Amino acid sequence: MRQPKVFLTGVSGYVGGHLFVRLVQKHPEWNYSVLVRTEKQAVDILAKYPDIEVVIGDLDNKDILVKAASTADIVLQLASADHLSGAVSLVEGLSQGQSAPGKLIHISGTGMVLDVSKGFGVLSDRTWNDVDDIEEISSLPLEGHVHRDVDEAVLEAGERLHVPVAIISPCTIHGLGQGPLKSMGFSVGGYIEKVIDRGRGFQVAEAQNQ
């Protein structure tokens, strides 16, 4: 039985790296290909995972993305949630699969439903449901809703090119990651840096959005 081939972006980062490691642990028999930006990152990852394929490039390299995605059964886009052309290039590549289009899982974020109409730090009274509210979420205006332009472009490209697309929108991800190159995300790390610079903790306005 042929094992699936999975192409991942963002493996040098926090979320992508952690998910890659967990996937390999769960399914060591699968075939993996990962995108990294530099030769050094490639060497470091291959030292730990010598059986995978490493592609050197970034989300701006359309030809590289299309070629890598065209040979994959599943693409996990775990790098920037706001790189429109890169995400669409992956959909285009998947549509060129040899037998049938592959599938794309694209990471976005709950920032798209962020409501600051009452100011920062003020709790919104809206509770979103990703099943019941999917139509509203998928049709939010592009202006003023972070990530929505990319999500819309990915969904449109998937429909146009007949590529199945799933978008995952996590909120703040924290904890110690197990990725090969990075173990801490920017959100907690960024907060810690500001606390150190300031010499004490802080809150935003009423600090109700917890």
Image (spheres, rainbow, N blue to C red):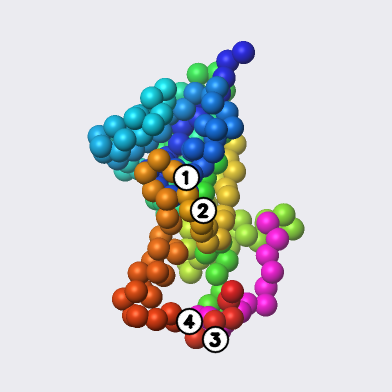
The type of residue carrying mark 1 is Gln
Q: In the displayed image of the protein, which residue is found farthest to the top?
A: 1
Which residue sits at x=48%, y=53%? 176
Q: In the displayed image of the protein, which residue is found farthest to the bottom?
A: 206
In the image, 89 versus 25, the foreground residue is 25
* Count of marks placed on residues: 4
Q: Gap in Å between the C-alphas at discs 4 and 1?
A: 29 Å
Question: Which callout, 3 or 4, points to the residue nearer the camera?
Answer: 4
The type of residue carrying mark 2 is Ser
Confirm whether the magenta stretch covers residue 39. no
Q: Give the percent coordinates (x, y) of residue 206.
A: 54, 86
Q: Residues within 10 Å of mark 4 (few under 14, many from 20)?
A: few
The type of residue carrying mark 3 is Glu
Question: Which callout, 4 or 2, points to the residue nearer the camera?
Answer: 4
- Left or right: 133, with 121 as reference point: right
* Magenta stretch bounds: 118-130
Q: Gap in Å between the C-alphas at discs 2 and 3?
A: 27 Å
Q: Are marks 4 and 1 in contact (CB under 8 Å)?
A: no
Question: Which callout, 2 or 1, points to the residue nearer the camera?
Answer: 1
Q: Of the residues under marks 4 and 1, which one precedes in the sequence? A: 1
Specify the label residue 203 is tagged with: 4
Q: Are marks 2 and 1 in contact (CB under 8 Å)?
A: no
Q: Are marks 3 and 1 in contact (CB under 8 Å)?
A: no
Q: Are marks 4 and 2 in contact (CB under 8 Å)?
A: no
Q: Give the percent coordinates (x, y) of residue 210.
A: 59, 74
| Residue assigned mark 2 | 108
For the N terminus, which image quadrant? top right
- Left or right: 80, with 95 as reference point: left
| Residue assigned mark 3 | 206
Q: Residues within 10 Å of mark 2 (few under 14, many from 20)?
A: many
Q: Secondary structure at mark 3?
A: loop
